[in-house]
Amino acid sequence: MKNAIVTAGAPAAIGPYSQAIEAGGMVFVSGQLPIDPATGAFPDSVTEQTKRSLLNCKAILEQAGLGFENVVKTTVFLKDMNDFAAMNEVYASFFAQPYPARAAFEVARLPKDALVEIEMIAVE
């Protein structure tokens, strides 16, 4: 059995996917672009885009009754790996030890030409 997690606190899905799916005591958060759900706009810098993507993830986790302490795995997609240090500084401010497992990749292009996209897996 799977259940969709939906919140107005994060951008609505714009395709055939859910903001997150809860299944078997796990919550799979779809990749979150740095879209402000109130305005539809992106911040300019990678630091502000990282923060916005993480705030979108936070809203989805909270809708599922969870928080960053429940996150066990993240994946960060970057337009430019030279932005890793700036992203990492913001990212670190959202998590406490023990940190989740993480992978980070430079990708050729992200939707809407974002600089960062972040997805997560959390456990209840």
Image (cartoon, helix red, strand yellow):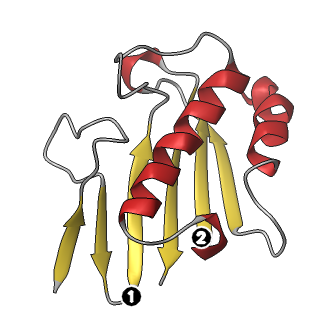
Distance in Å between CA atoms under marks 1 and 2 = 12 Å
SS at mark 2 in the image: strand
Residue drawn at 52 percent across, 25 percent down = 108
Q: Nearer the viewer, residue 55 or 122?
A: 55
Among the 4 quarters of the image, the one containing residue 72? bottom right
Depicted 23 relative to depicted 9: above or below: below
Residue drawn at 80 percent across, 47 percent down = 93
Q: Measured from the top left, where is residue 81 in percent x and y?
A: 74, 30
Which mark, residue 76? Answer: none
Q: Residues within 10 Å of mark 2 (few under 14, many from 20)?
A: many
Which mark, residue 25? Answer: 1
Residue drawn at 28 percent across, 50 percent down = 7
Q: Is residue 80 visible?
A: no
Left or right of 14, for residue 36: right
Q: Measured from the top left, where is residue 77 in percent x and y?
A: 58, 40
Which badge, 1 or 2, comes first in the chain's sequence? 1
* Number of callouts: 2
Depicted 86 relative to depicted 68: above or below: above
Q: Nearer the viewer, residue 9 or 101?
A: 9
Amino acid type, mark 1 = Gly
- Pointers 1 and 2 in contact (CB under 8 A)? no
Q: Measured from the top left, where is residue 4 in percent x and y?
A: 20, 65
Among the 4 quarters of the image, the one containing residue 75? bottom right
Amino acid type, mark 2 = Val
Left or right of 6, for residue 80: right
Q: Residue furthest top?
A: 44
Left or right of 108, for residue 60: left
Among the 4 quarters of the image, the one containing residue 86? top right
Find disc 2 in the rendering and name its residue.
71
Q: Is residue 65 visible?
A: yes
Q: Measured from the top left, where is residue 46 in percent x and y?
A: 68, 22
Q: Nearer the viewer, residue 33 or 66?
A: 66
